Structure formats: structure tokens, C-alpha cells
Amino acid sequence: MDGIDTPRTQANLVLLGPPGAGKGTQARMLEEKFGLVQLSTGDLLRAAVKAGTEAGLQAKAVMEAGDLVSDEIVIAILRDRLAEPDCANGVILDGFPRTTVQAEALDGLMEDMGADIRVAISLEVDDAAMVTRISGRFTCAGCGEGYHDTFKTPAVDGTCDKCGGTEMTRRADDNAETVESRLRAYHAQTAPLIDYYDGKGVLARVDAMRDIDAVAQALTAVVREAVA
Ligand code: AMP
């Protein structure tokens, strides 16, 4: 079925997976399909860095090194964003939680809101392919649509398919060395959350080595069932 499939009750989803797994791309697809709001702590932190806020100043060097920003900063940023009215139907968490402390804090926030994590989806990929995926990616500065030099090029070179914008940006941390640190941080601190959500009985695994459309189809099926 095409069009928006808005869940009947608040449905919050978590996307887990290493950098390059496709969390951002798939979150944007799910956002359109299910009327949920994508919450990317990476995007929120990059906005804080750009705005020069206190949190942004503290996060900048850590992000450039490919390490994790402190739980305290990230949880505070997420808590504020979750309180905004557009999150009322539910959110797709992209890049949060990344540590057990964050996952436990999220459970507390959900409880306070009388909500829950309906499903946590692990995007399963091979690390070896992630460096190529990340090195080629770029984003429309106007609307945030993501592209890739090989896997997803705009129909007209240099022009965004979605909004017609012509300014494209590449992330400072999307380089080979930083990607290695980001993958290490993922395996050390975030991968254990797969067991955390499995233990709660809300884990789904999706093979994310396939092309973008095939992964989107698999994810849509998982989310449709979870929010039904
Ligand atoms: P992302 O856009 O999700 O790849 O995140 C980019 C960078 O932001 C990461 O490499 C971290 O430095 C930081 N970051 C984003 N989300 C989190 C989080 N939940 N916990 C700690 N650091 C984060």
C-alpha cells in the first residue's frame, strides 16, 4: 500500500547498526511512509556544533575524532527534542541509543511519556563494506536528502531530486580514519544493545547488505507489523 500508514497509537522505533548501515536513508523512508519523525542525534549534535551552543562546543572535537559524545550531553539533547509536539505520533531513533546508559535513560523517558519502544531493528552489514559506503556519501544542504557517488546519484548531476537545491555537503567525519574509530566505537559500545533489545523481546534483524529498495521493503514489513 502506498501513502502514509500512520500508526493508531504512539509507536517509537530504534534503528541500530554501524555507521554506513543506512540508518539515515531508511529512517527518512520510514518517516514518509508511517508519519513518524526521524530523530538523529548525529543531526542534532551537528546542528548544535553549527549553532555554537555549549553542548556543540563540547561535542565538536569528540565527533571529529569519531568517538562518542558523553551520555549526559546526548541524553539531554534527545530529551528536549522528544518533548516537542511533532513527536507525538512516535519517532524513529537513528543513532540513539549508542550505549547501555543511553538505552536505560530512553526506557525511563518512554515510561514518563507512557510510551514504549515498539521495535528495535538491527541493520546487519559487513564492516568491510562500510568504508566504501561512507566515503562516497553526500547530502543536500537544503532538505537533507542523502546521496552516494555510486549507490544513489541524483538524476541531474549536482541537483537534488527532492528539492532542486544545488548545494551538496559532505560530513567532516566521513573519512577513512574517522570511520575506523566510529566502527570501533560501534562494536565496543553499541552492538551490545542488540542483546539488550533481544532480551526485551522487541528486536528484529534486517539484512542491510542488499540495495536500498530491498532493505526498505524488508523494513517496511517489519514496521508495519510492529505498529499494527
Ligand atoms: P551519526 O550522524 O549518527 O553518524 O553521528 C555522528 C557522530 O555524532 C558520532 O560519531 C558521535 O561522535 C556523535 N553521536 C551521535 N549520536 C550519538 C550518541 N547517541 N551518543 C554519543 N555520540 C553520538
Image (cartoon, grey):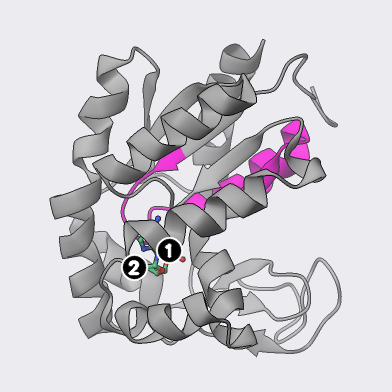
Kindly identify which residue carries mark 2: 69
Residue 109 to residue 137: above or below: above
Q: Residue 17 or 118: which is nearer the viewer?
A: 118
Q: What residue is shown at x 48% (from left), y 72% (from top)?
A: 150
| Residue kind at label 1, given as amino acid type | Ile
Highlighted range, magenta: 15-38
Quick one: 137 or 185, which is closer to the camera? Answer: 185
Question: Label 1, on which residue?
Answer: 73
User: Mark 1 packing: few (<14 Cα in 10 Å), some, or many (20+)?
Assistant: some
For residue 50, above or below residue 201 = below
Q: Is mark 1 within 8 Å of ligand 1?
A: yes
Residue occupying the point 15% across, 63% down: 184
Under mark 2, the amino acid is Val
Viewer-proximal residue among 60 and 212: 60
The percent position of residue 69, horizontal first and vertical second, equals 34, 68
Residue at image coords 34%, 12%:
201
Residue 54 percent location from the top left of the image = 51, 81
- Residue 169 appears in the rendering: no
State which quadrant residue 74 falls in: bottom left
120 w.r.t. 31: above or below: above
- x, y (%) of residue 103? 35, 37
Disc 2 C-beta below 8 A from ligand 1 = yes
Q: Where residue 88 sits: x, y (%)?
A: 76, 33
Where is 136 relative to 95, above or below? below
Q: Residue at x 40, y 78 (%)?
A: 59
User: Callout 2 environment at 10 Å: few (<14), some (14 to 19), or many (20+)?
Assistant: some
Give residue 72's quadrant in the image: bottom left
Camera-near label (1 vs 2) is 1
Name the foreground residue: 23 vs 117: 117
Q: CA distance from mark 1 to mark 2?
A: 7 Å
